[in-house]
Amino acid sequence: MKKTIFGIFLVVILITSFIAPTYAVTPVESGYDVSVYKSIYDVNPVDLTLPKPLKVTLPNSQDFGVVVVDTKTKEAQAVETIENTRVNTPKAYFATATAVKGEPSNFVDGDPKTVAEFDIDQDEGSAEIQLSFDQELTSSALILELDDHVAPPYTTAIEAREGDRWVTVLAEEFTYDTYITFPAKTAKAWRVKFKHSQPLRIREITLQDDKLSVEKSGTEVFWLGKPGVTYQIYADAAVYKPVKTGELGNLLGNPDDIITATLGPKQTNQAYKDPDSDFDGIPNFRDNCVNLANEKQEDLDNNKRGDACEDHDKDGVIDAVDNCPQDPNANQQDTDGDKIGDVCDTEESRPTEKMPWLPWVGMGGAAIVVIGVIVATLKKDKK
C-alpha cells in the first residue's frame, strides 16, 4: 500500500514539473492597450551618451493621452504632455449653430474652461455650426477638444464658402475622432456638420492653420530617452485607457537638457479596434448607450439614445436600474425584495401582503399556546 501511494505521489510531481514551465512563460501584461490608438509614429533615433529628456510634437490634440514605447522591451515610458494648439490662429467667430446649451461662442473663445453642448433632445443628433474668420484660412484639419467623458461625433461633414455658394470639403464621413483631416482648402467661412448619438459637449472647435509649423500648434510629448534605445508613439486614442509606467522625473526642470527629436510618417495602427466601452458587442460610434450594456439597442422614442440609459420618469435613476421606470421613486424602495419598486408593484409577494389577516392568526395562535402553557402549569401545581 505504501509503495502504491509513493508511486502516485511521484507521478503527480513529474506531471507538475512538466506543467509548471507552461505557466512560467505566460507573457506579462504590457500595461497598455494598443487597440485604442489609431496612429503610430516612429521616433527617429537620437544619439545619446547619457539619459536625456526627449521631446517630439504631434500635429494634433491628444484628448485621451499617448503611449511612448521602448521598441525592444515594449515597456511604456512615463511621459509629460503639453497642449499647444492655439498659437496665432486666426480669430474665429461663431455665425450660426443648431440648438446649443450654453453660449455657442464658447466653442471658439480659446478658453478650454468654457464648454457648450449641442442639445441632442432638440437637434435629434444632427448638429451644425457655421464659423467665419477675420481673414482667409488655409486648413486641412479640424480639431475638437471635448469635455471629459464625452464621445466624439460618429460622422463629420465640412463645407467652405466659395463666393455665394457652399462647396463640400469633406463629404459626410464616418470619423468618430477628434482630429479630422481633409484636402486643404482656403476660405473665410466654414460650415461643420456632426452626427452624434450622445450629448456632445465641446470645449473648443479649431480649424488648423496650415501656415503654422507643427512645433507651434501641436501636442508636445516629453519622456526620458536612454542611450541606444529607440521609441514608438501610439497616438490618436479613441477612448481613455490607463497606462502603467514607472516614475515620472522632473523632465521640464532644465529646458537646456531637453533634446528635440523628430517623427517618421504617421502610420495606421493595424491593431486598432473600434472601442466598445460597455462590452455589449456594439462599437461606441453605433451604440446609443455608450457606457451601459444594451445589446438590443431599444429606443422606443426614437431619439437616438437607448432606453436603458434614459430616465423617462425623471426621478434621477436611469431606466436600466430603475425598479419602477415609469413611476418616480428616487428611494427605490422594494419592501418584498422582488426587484419591483413598491410604487409600481401591483402584487406584493410577501405572505402578509397577500393575506393581511395572517399576522392576526399568528398572534391568536401564539396567545392560545401561551394560555395553554399557563393552564397546564397551574394544573400541575395544583396536583
Image (cartoon, grey):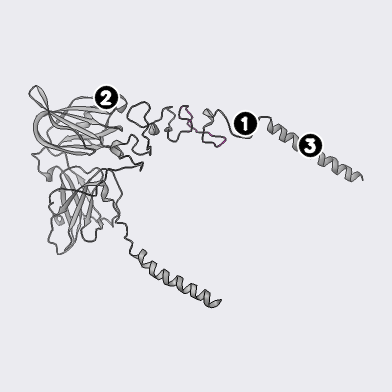
Q: Nearer the viewer, residue 283 or 317?
A: 283
CA gap, disc 2 and disc 1: 50 Å
Kindly tell me whether residue 136 is visible in this rendering: no
What's the residue type where badge 2 is placed? Ala
> To which residue does mark 2 refer?
99
Q: Residue at x 48, y 73 (%)?
A: 9
Q: Residue at x 75, y 34 (%)?
A: 364
Q: Quadrant of residue 275?
A: top left
Q: Residue at x 20, y 33 (%)?
A: 156
Relative to 312, residue 39 above or below: below
Q: Residue at x 41, y 27 (%)?
A: 312
Magenta residues, start to end: 323-339
Of the numbered discs in the image, which one, if any, rests on residue 252? none
Q: Quadrant of the N terminus?
A: bottom right
Kindly tell me whether residue 350 is visible in this rendering: yes
Q: Is residue 254 magenta?
A: no
Mark 2: secondary structure: loop
> To which residue does mark 1 refer?
353
Q: Quadrant of residue 160?
A: top left
Q: Is residue 324 magenta?
A: yes
> Around disc 2, counting alpha carbons within 10 Å, would you say few (fewer than 14), some (14 to 19), or many (20 or more)?
some
Q: Is residue 323 left or right of residue 197?
A: right
Q: Quadrant of the C terminus?
A: top right
**Nearest-to-viewer mark from 2 and 1:** 1
